[in-house]
Image (cartoon, coloured by chain):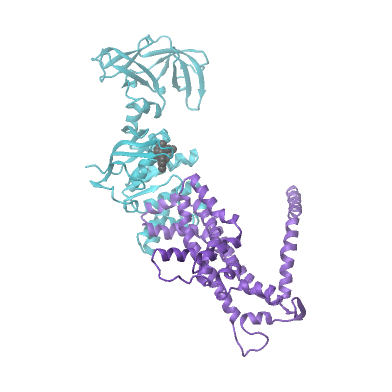
Amino acid sequence: MAFGKTADSRRRQGLVLLLSPVTLLLGVFFLIPLGIMIVYSFLEPGLYGGVEWNWYPYNYGRIIGWPLNDYETFEPIYLSIFLGSVKIALLTVLVSLLICYPAAFWVSRMSEPRKSFVLFLITLPFFANLLVRIYAWLLLLRPSGFINMALESLGLIAQPLDMLFSSFAVIVGMVYIFTPFMFLPIYANVEKLDFSLVRASQDLGAPPVQTFLRVILPLTVPGIAGGSIIVFIPALGNFIVPAFLGGSKVQMTGNLIERSFLQSRDWPFGAALSLLIMGSVVIIVMFQVIRSTRQNRGAA
Amino acid sequence: MGFLQIASAHKAYQTPEGALVRALDDISIDVRNNEFLTLLGPSGCGKTTLLKIIAGFEDLDGGDIILEGRSLKEVPAHRRPFNTVFQNYALFPHMTISQNIGYGLDVAGVKKPDRDRRVGEALEMVGLVGYGSRRPAQLSGGQQQRVALARSLILKPRVLLLDEPLSALDRKMREAMQIELKNLQDSVGITFIFVTHDQEEALAMSDRIAVISNGRLQQLGSPTEVYDAPDNEFVANFVGTSNLFTGRIIDVDTGQGLVTMETGNGRRLCAGSRAYGLGDEVKLILRPEHLRLVDGDTPDGPCLIEGSVKDVIFVGSVVHLHVDVGFGRTAIVYHHHDRTGFRNDIEHGAHVRLAYAPDSAHLIANGRG
Ligand SMILES: Nc1ncnc2c1ncn2[C@@H]1O[C@H](COP(=O)(O)OP(=O)(O)OP(=O)(O)O)[C@@H](O)[C@H]1O
Ligand SMILES: [Mg+2]
């Protein structure tokens, strides 16, 4: 007993030592900046950037539609941009899910060498610069771009489609960027799916649709949830894609944050917007954690 | 008309290298209603393939599966009145035990009160009352195996297919489950087709055994038929242990139904048989337990083998003797050391005389396998 205790406490000491660099790193590069952000979001913006050290809750007021303490003029423009961003992020998740879910099954059935090759192809875009890749979409989607030219020469359309600078273009670009992040967790899940369970379901009389809904889908929920979160979080805060492919028509919260910091130099407002995104992400991640611990408790 | 006919089933797989594997090569079995049929054979002989074809997970290349006169070729797996107990049990990890057992009923649209009652009965049948709300991962291997059984049997299939269901269990558990399974089969009155590569298991449980090797049916018969009168050398060696001697028949005594065989080395051995005539090339099979140690007074003759003991292996109830019988041959003898008190002191190098009853020697035609 006594032995166990000393060994235990010694192990704990060792662990503390081992973890202290991590703690330090997290503290310096994550917690301190986060603290600064939270503090700044309640301060008054300085005239030329920076902050005035005055209590100033109106940054958040502005976000939810009441700038200053003027309750007459309710104008939830930032809120509606935020909701629009959520919508675009959700659509990005949905579209990449619809692509990746069947693709994961398809790839998992391939022979070993082909499988590795396809997985290599999926990670290939990471080797090219993000801006270049998005710029490529600009060239593809614009009225005189490749897609319109191809469609026109096939006689499918009379006039070029106006695809660029729309939610459509933004979603296309986001799906393109985030598809690997959706694919990999789903693939990892599907790959280890025990196919004999599908057989068992069939064997017990379930036709294919029922087998899918009752066995395959529930068992791939972890992959779907993981992929969706990994895509949703960066999609919600993304500003590069809407800046390139959304033009002035499609604004996302990410663009607002970028502009508050870099153009209007309203740091507190940018901080408040960032915390809004962060807050919604935290809520979603918490849901996922609760869901998966509940599931693990069941499976253990 | 048979109950379930496996009619000259053929199945070949293409390996990635392009070679063709004949997993099933012209297998025909008439499965009887309510019997416990075992498919026995070494690893890779095609047992699982045959089971998958019966269940409908694989298509036949040739032949047919016929249930009561109706071909099942066009019937998909989920509509066949068969259920499978998988080797790894394949329990749904995201469902409770009750949900697992009730799955088939749920899918079939059986309403909850009725379903709950039948799940309760099934839990009782396999001795798992009180485990209904657990998850599969919270059960032991043997318990999971019972859940898999209950999940299949609750649907009252015409045939239950079992793919090495006991192989994951330890020896004690396996032996207990063998008896349980056999009793269960008797009480539910469902045809069991049971796959194993363990010959003792097959002998202990089956009404009939189909011995398969390399995708071909080697023998189909009751455990005693397969053990006492193997059709060929493969069966003789795979089911139990055999001492085999190859030779030609040199003397036939039709009156007593006795033949004498001479091996290439001039060794003469007797056998009780009326099936073979003078000059026939045969193999003679002697089971180790049919060889008796006799004392020096016993007269020499063709039903006697002499040799010297090479190894003595004590395995508990019997002693296994490896006896050098000359010409580089070793005979294996199971000696009940306490039966008569006679020669409990067999040692390495001891000279022994081994006698056997002519009828315990079994002859097969040479060249048939
Ligand atoms: N999908 C497949 N593709 C190629 N070859 C296969 C396939 N399935 C089985 N085989 C081959 O067919 C033969 C029979 O396989 P099967 O699984 O029926 O053996 P088994 O008798 O069940 O063996 P075990 O006792 O090891 O389970 C083997 O040689 C195996 O390699
Ligand atoms: Mg097998």
Kindly indicate the quadrant of the structure image that contains residue A29: bottom right
Q: Which chain is cyan?
A: B
Q: Position of residue A250 (x, y in %)?
A: 55, 74
Please state, as top left, top right, bottom left or bottom right, where the C terminus of chain B lies in the image.
top left
Which residue occupies the extreme right position in the image? A53
Give above or below for A83 relative to B311: below
Give above or below for A135 relative to B282: below
Quadrant position of ligand 1? top left
Which residue occupies the extreme bottom position in the image? A72
Q: Is residue B274 visible?
A: yes
Q: Which chain is purple?
A: A
Instruction: Please state which of residues A191 and B325 is positioned toward the viewer in this rendering.
Output: A191
Q: Position of residue B90 (x, y in %)?
A: 45, 50
Please state, as top left, top right, bottom left or bottom right, where the N terminus of chain B lies in the image.
top left
Q: Position of residue A119 (x, y in %)?
A: 53, 51
Instruction: Please state which of residues B188 and B66 is positioned toward the viewer in this rendering.
Output: B66
Seen at 45% across and 39% down, the residue is B175
Give above or below for B95 relative to B307: below
